[in-house]
Amino acid sequence: AQSVTQLDSQVPVFEEAPVELRCNYSSSVSVYLFWYVQYPNQGLQLLLKYLSGSTLVKGINGFEAEFNKSQTSFHLRKPSVHISDTAEYFCAVTEGGSGGYQKVTFGTGTKLQVIP
Amino acid sequence: NAGVMQNPRHLVRRRGQEARLRCSPMKGHSHVYWYRQLPEEGLKFMVYLQKENIIDESGMPKERFSAEFPKEGPSILRIQQVVRGDSAAYFCASSPPSVFPYEQYFGPGTRLTVT
C-alpha cells in the first residue's frame, strides 16, 4: 500500500530565503508524485508533478521538486520565497497501473509561513 | 472552461439533520473523487465515482454516508443524521477519462459545521 510522510507540519521562513518542504513516500510499485498548494479557504491547486523522465521537476510560482528513488523522497524547494507563498502544501502519491483507476494518497500537509 | 464547482461553500446543520453536498465536475470529466479534510489533518479519500457507478468507496464510513454520480446532474455526497465529528471540509475533485495517470482538479470545498 502506498503512503506519504511529510516530516514537518509547519515551516517558518523569512521572506526571500530559500525553503525546502520534505516528502517521503512508500510504495511497492512505480509511483507518480504530486505537490499541491492550498491557500486559506480554498481548494487544492497542482504545483507540479513527476510522472517519468527527468527527476527534477519544475512547477508554477518558481517551485521545483526532485524525485529521488533511492531515498524515496520528493522534496519541494524554492530558492526565494514571497509572502504570497504562505499556504499549506500537500505531497501526494499514486501508483502505476490499476487499469485506469487512480487512487491518490495525500500527506498530512506542511504549513509554510513566510515572515516579512 | 469553468472549474470544479461545489455548493454550498458553507453548510451549517444541527445534529441529526441531513447534509447534501454537490459537486459539478469540469466539462468533459467523468471521474469524480470525494475527500474529507479534518482540522490539522490531510485529505482523506472517501469515494471514487464514474457516471452512474461507484468504483471505490473504501474510504467511506460504513453508516450514514452515501454518494452518487447520476447520468445527469452533479455528484452528491449525502450525510444522514450528522454528528459533530462530521464537521470538516469536503472536497471534490474530477479528472478526465484519459490515459492514466491524470491530474485531479479540485473544487473549492464545502465546509460543514455541525452544531
Image (cartoon, rainbow, N blue to C red):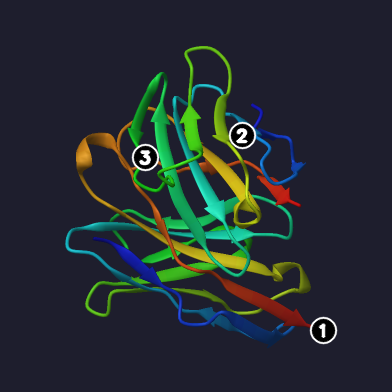
Q: Is residue A96 left or right of residue B20?
A: left
Looking at this view, name the residue that lies furthest to the left.
A28
Residue B58 vertical position relative to residue A66 in the rendered view, above or below:
above
User: Are marks 3 and 1 in one subunit?
Assistant: no
| Foreground pick, B82 / A81 | B82
Q: Amino acid at mark 2?
A: Val
Task: Pinpoint the chain carrying mark 3.
Answer: B
Residue holding disc 1:
A116
For label 3, the SS is loop
- To which quarter of the image does residue B76 belong? top right
Task: Pinpoint the chain carrying mark 2.
Answer: B
Q: Is residue A37 left or right of residue B112?
A: left
Residue holding disc 3:
B57
Callout 1–callout 2 Cβ contact below 8 Å: no
Measured as percent of width and height from the top left, residue B7 is found at 71, 33
Residue A3 vertical position relative to residue A113 in the rendered view, above or below:
above
Residue A55 seen by the camera: no
Quadrant into which the C terminus of chain A falls:
bottom right
Measured as percent of width and height from the top left, residue A109 is found at 54, 69
Residue A26 seen by the camera: yes
Marks 3, 1: nearer the viewer: 3
Residue holding disc 2:
B4
Q: Amino acid at mark 3?
A: Glu
Q: CA distance from mark 1 to mark 2?
A: 34 Å
Q: Is residue A37 left or right of residue B113?
A: left
For label 1, the SS is loop
Residue found 63% across the figure and 65% down from its top? B39
